[in-house]
Image (spheres, rainbow, N blue to C red):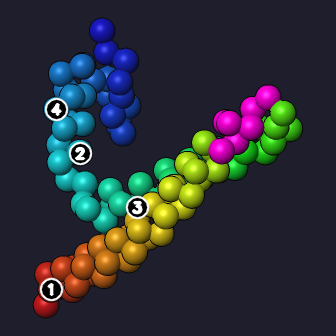
Amino acid sequence: MAFWKDKQGKQLTRAEFMVRWKKGIADVTPYQQVKMQVRSTYLMIAGFIAGIIITFLSIKTLWWLLLILIGGLGINVMQLISMRQKLAAFKLWEEQMQGGKNK
């Protein structure tokens, strides 16, 4: 049973899909990995903010959850700052590597 399709529309079996998937994952650069982590962190921060707003509406019973969410938000913001610095370094490194290949 094949329910995966490639870019040309050809159906792939599970084994063919897994071979292609493993090859694609192996070719991901550190810059691409960190770029995706930064995007995911933005989504997590948005979730924390939404959770804080919703919890704030029921603060009498959920004050403890509000404290946890605020702590988690702080940790994720610090993580985002660190990852953005790493992203800038990887971007510079990748640009230098591509510049070396062209010369």
Earlier along the polypeptide chain: callout 3 or callout 4?
4
Kindly indicate the quadrant of the structure image that contains residue 15: top left
**Quick one: SS at disc 2?**
helix
Q: Which sits in the foreground, 10 or 93?
A: 93
Counting residues from the N terminus, which is met first, the one under dot 2 or under dot 4? 4
Q: Which residue is mark 3?
A: 35
Residue 100, label in figure = 1
Q: Which residue is mark 2?
A: 24
Distance from label 3 to label 1 (Cα)? 22 Å
Q: Nearer the viewer, residue 21 or 66?
A: 66
Q: Nearer the viewer, residue 72 or 30?
A: 72
Disc number lying in front (3 or 1): 3
Asked if 6 appears above or below 28 in the picture, the reply is above
Which span of residues is magenta-colored? 61-67
- Amino acid under label 1? Gly
User: Could you tell whether 96 is left or right of 39 in the image?
Assistant: left
Secondary element under disc 1, as helix, strand or loop, is: helix
Residue at the bottom extreme? 103
Specify which label sits upstream in the sequence, 1 or 4. Answer: 4
Q: Circle 4 sits in a helix, a strand or a loop, which is it?
A: helix
Seen at 14% across and 81% down, the residue is: 101
Would residue 60 appear left or right of 32 to someone viewing this image?
Answer: right
- Tell me the mark number nearer the camera, choosing from 3 and 2: 3
Q: CA distance from mark 2 to mark 1?
A: 24 Å
Query: Between marks 3 and 4, how big is the CA–CA gap?
Result: 24 Å
**What residue does disc 4 label?**
19
Name which residue type carries label 4.
Val
Element carrying mark 3: helix
